[in-house]
Amino acid sequence: MVVVDNNVLSSLAKIDRLDLLRRIFDDVATVPSVFDELHRDEVAGYEFVDRIDDIKGYRDGWLRVRSVSEADLELADEIVDSSLSFTDAECIAIAQRRDERLLTDDSHAGEMASQRGVEVWDLKLCLEAAIVTECICSRSELDSVIEALREKDGYRFSTTDRQDLHDRLESTTRD
């Protein structure tokens, strides 16, 4: 099980590759406050938000929405700080209390989660998993995903990260 935050969901939705999450992980979940963020006036109505709405579990999709207990909220209140949103704190709390992996590209949220013993994956690690599980099978497909993330989300992989992904692809296709 993986708990995915708003930034990774949004990034993959913008490039129309939410399918990677479903293909990599058996169960994918998020928290209600992620949807609250997605439906604020500044992002509501964008096509990528509709793509995320379309995969909600209660709409016969595969993205589960974790119910949040009072204990989860109390833990989130403990975690939140001046540089961490409540939504990120809620994702961390859910992942910690349910012993689930957290998928985030927010370095501060990732560090806070790691300090609490939560396994954290970022988008690079997610793409590596997509390569290993053969969801991404060719250099052209990988380059297409990387370029789409740059163009549509402003996402920048370092030269080292790009090389690591290409090396992973090369080693996987040789095996």
Image: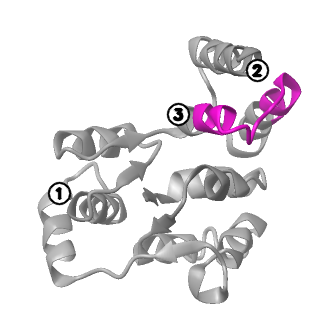
Q: CA distance from mark 3 to mark 2?
A: 17 Å
Which residue is disc 1 drawn over? Answer: 79
Q: Amino acid at mark 3?
A: Leu
Quadrant of the image for the C terminus? Answer: top right
Gap between marks 1 and 2, in whole Å?
41 Å
Q: Quadrant of residue 99?
A: bottom left
Q: Secondary structure at mark 1?
A: helix
- Residue 92 percent across, percent down from the top left: 29, 57
Q: Is residue 99 above or below residue 147?
A: below
Q: Tell me the magenta residue range.
A: 127-144
On screen, residue 149 versus residue 121, left or right, reads right
Residue 88 located left or right of residue 171: left
Q: Is residue 21 above or below residue 140?
A: below
Q: Residue at x 34, y 62 (%)?
A: 91
Q: Residue at x 59, y 37 (%)?
A: 129
Out of 11 and 132, give the one closest to the viewer. 132
- Whole-percent x and y of residue 137? 80, 32
> Between 168 and 6, which is closer to the camera in this rendering?
168
Say which of marks 3 and 2 sits in front: 2
Q: Which residue is mark 3?
A: 125
Which residue is farthest front?
175
Quadrant location, the N terminus: bottom left
Identify the image quadrant of residue 39: bottom right
